[in-house]
Image (cartoon, rainbow, N blue to C red):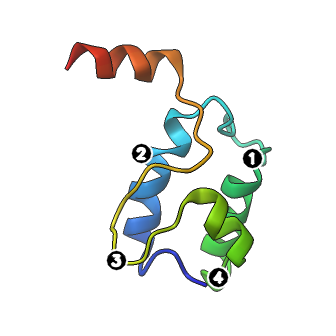
Amino acid sequence: MRPFSCGSQYGDWTSANCERCTKAAEGYAWPTCEIEAALCEAYCGDGEITDRIAARMGESKGRYNWPCGEVEWTEEWKAKCEQV
């Protein structure tokens, strides 16, 4: 299945989730998070991910952006949210 209809949706989702997660890849390292790795492969390939990965990320048809089902927020992001 394809969770995103374009690269912009992929970028928005990963910046809202992966880049704020303690499991995110650093620098040019390959992701250790299976969800982030699957999304990277999909982005460089045909955009397809498995149903298992979609379920783990909490994929919801019809929604443009949503919180990942396995995100572990960084302390910096938690502090920023508490300021609002």
Quarter of the picture containing the C terminus is: top left
Is 11 located above or below residue 47 in the figure? Answer: above
Confirm or deny contact between disc 3 and disc 2 (CB under 8 A).
no
Q: Which residue is mark 4?
A: 48
Counting from the top left corner in percent of width and height, residue 50 is at 72, 77
Nearest to N terminus: mark 3 or mark 2: 2
Confirm or deny contact between disc 2 and disc 4 (CB under 8 A).
no
Nearest to N terminus: mark 1 or mark 2: 2
Q: Which residue is mark 2?
A: 16
Q: CA distance from mark 3 to mark 4?
A: 17 Å
Nearest to N terminus: mark 2 or mark 4: 2
Counting from the top left corner in percent of width and height, residue 77 is at 42, 23
Name the secondary structure under disc 4: loop
Q: CA distance from mark 3 to mark 1?
A: 25 Å
Q: Is residue 35 left or right of residue 8?
A: right
Name the secondary structure under disc 3: loop
**Looking at the picture, which amino acid does disc 4 mark?**
Glu
Q: Which residue is mark 1?
A: 33
Q: Residue at x 50, y 52 (%)?
A: 14
Counting from the top left corner in percent of width and height, residue 10 is at 47, 65
Q: Is residue 19 left or right of residue 16?
A: right
Name the secondary structure under disc 2: helix
Q: Which residue is mark 3?
A: 62
Q: CA distance from mark 2 to mark 4?
A: 20 Å
- Classify 10 Å Cα crowding around label 2: few (below 14), some (14-19), many (20 and above): some
Nearest to N terminus: mark 3 or mark 4: 4
**Looking at the picture, which amino acid does disc 1 mark?**
Cys
Q: Residue at x 50, y 34 (%)?
A: 20
Nearest to N terminus: mark 4 or mark 1: 1
Q: Give the foreground label among 3 and 2.
A: 3
Nearest to N terminus: mark 3 or mark 1: 1
